Image (cartoon, grey):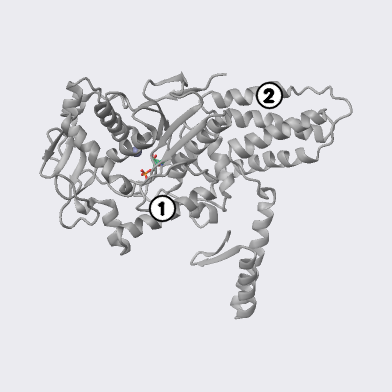
Amino acid sequence: MELKLYNSLSGQKETFKPILEGNIGMYVCGPTVYSNVHMGNVRTFMSFDFIYRTLLYLGYKVRYVRNITDAGHLTDDGTVENDRFVKQSRLEKLEPMELVQKYTVDFHKVLERFNLLPPTIEPTATGHILEQLELTKLLLEKGYAYEVNGSVYFDVRAYNEKGGNYGELSKRNIDELYANTRILDGQDEKKNPQDFALWKNASPAHIMKWPSPWGEGFPGWHLECTAMSTKYLGETFDIHGGGMDLKFPHHECEIAQGTACNGASPVNYWLHTNMLTLNGQKMSKSTGNTILPIELITGENTFFEKPFHPTVVRFFFLQAHYRSVVDLSNEALVASEKGYTRLMEAVKLLKSLVPAQSTEGSFDLKAWKLKCDEALLDDFNSPILIAHLFEAVKVIFAAKEGKESLSQEDLDALAEAMNCFVLEVLGLEEVEAAHSDKLDSALKVLIDLRDQARQSKNWSLSDQIRDKLLVEGIELKDSRDGTSYLIN
Ligand code: AMP
Ligand code: ZN
């Protein structure tokens, strides 16, 4: 059976052929760690976690590189006022590297909560300045770049004249791009607006800067991914991933840089995941239409009626294909919670089912397993896989009621397959979700009793309730809107 995946470069589903039989090199653009990741970011990283888990399930040995962008991801003009790290450092009164540490730790904690596996290499941009300098020098030597005022830019026109095809990934026409782009302030030192910074000159006010042959400066964002992917996966590797919004200009620039340096396209298969929206609107920090993972998990937000366990959110995300837009809404999450609970009940039930006397059931386990595998092999189709898992759920409940016959052998094979698909491939976790509503109600009763104790100034009782819950791993949080809880 062949693995087919949708390659954004060709715009088609293709049969996957790794460069080295049985091995896969995969690079995924990581977070820019100047603030907390939001649920949209989590969705993208989770999609790649599912892809990674599927590749492992299919028997591949995967080198999975996901970087940390801790320098160089700036706004267009590269001025210190617009350097995201510098701006946020000032706001939070932290050293830029303290900021990086704070949000890297947060990122890891968040992904752990959603049960994402760590990548096999997690390199940082600041740890690869030398490699980025070397690539910049090489591009200058080869005539693909030019220096102006201590900054070095990639020359897109020169690249295309030498046979490159800037625009091939995002399907943009370079001449139209030239005709339609305004030159923004601060960009006028570039020969053409499409040219992008490989190295940027740093003003004295810049804090994060490094010495270079062109004076003190810092690397351009696109170059770090080329430097790190080349270093750990080679000049051409199998899979490169990221969110759709990174196709242009980031990935387009990576292709141009890699091709210009090595004379070959850097990536064989480009995978792009689709966006997460919130109540039908694009998730964006600037409009406030955004939600942090912790707000969703604790229920401390204005969007949802109740908290949702991370594994329920994971199930909800994976009910959609990675190339479809997903909308986060209360109704959708509540529906997913019900689906998740039934699925996990079936997994649990399977352990206690007794084999039937007669084994002439209608369930063809081999055919079912094949369909599950086919869904995975068809461009990582998680919603189809989940639909097949629910066929098995029906059979399991029918077997409990004596309406379906499963032999001991069938039961063992079904348990093994369900555990593998549900826990390892989908990465869901067994929590007492079936009782989560009851737990929620019980905690609300306790919170009410504590409120009453506080109103009658019985501080010792109210503190006891809080402290005893804390010992059980349940933290009460008071705010203007009332008390919520966090289960650790
Ligand atoms: P950033 O830290 O901004 O570089 O983003 C990290 C990853 O999250 C990138 O792959 C983005 O494409 C992805 N991303 C950003 N916003 C969303 C969203 N609303 N939905 C899904 N993925 C997103
Ligand atoms: Zn990248």
Q: Residue at x 66, y 46 (%)?
A: 430
| Residue 304 location (% of width, % of height) | 52, 51
Q: Quadrant of residue 397?
A: top right
Q: Position of residue 85 (x, y in %)?
A: 29, 53
Residue at 26% across / 31% down in the picture? Answer: 257
Would residue 117 be seen by someone viewing this image from the given angle?
yes
On the rendered image, what quadrant is the C terminus found in?
bottom right
The answer to whether marks 2 and 1 mark residues whose Cβ atoms lie closer than 8 Å is no
Element type at marker 1? helix
Can you tell me which quadrant of the image ligand 2 is in? Answer: top left
Query: Which quadrant of the figure contains the N terminus?
Result: top right
State the residue at coordinates (68%, 41%): 344
Q: As shown in the figure, which amino acid type bears the numbered disc 1?
A: Thr
Mark 1 — residue?
Answer: 104
User: Residue 192 falls in which quadrant of the image?
Assistant: top left
Residue 329 spot, x, y in % from top left: 51, 44
Q: Is residue 178 above or below residue 466?
A: above
Q: Which residue in the structure is indicated by mark 2? A: 368
Q: Distance from label 2 to label 1 (Cα)?
A: 42 Å
Residue type indicated by callout 2: Trp
Q: Is residue 293 visible?
A: no
Cβ of mark 1 under 8 Å from ligand 1: the answer is no
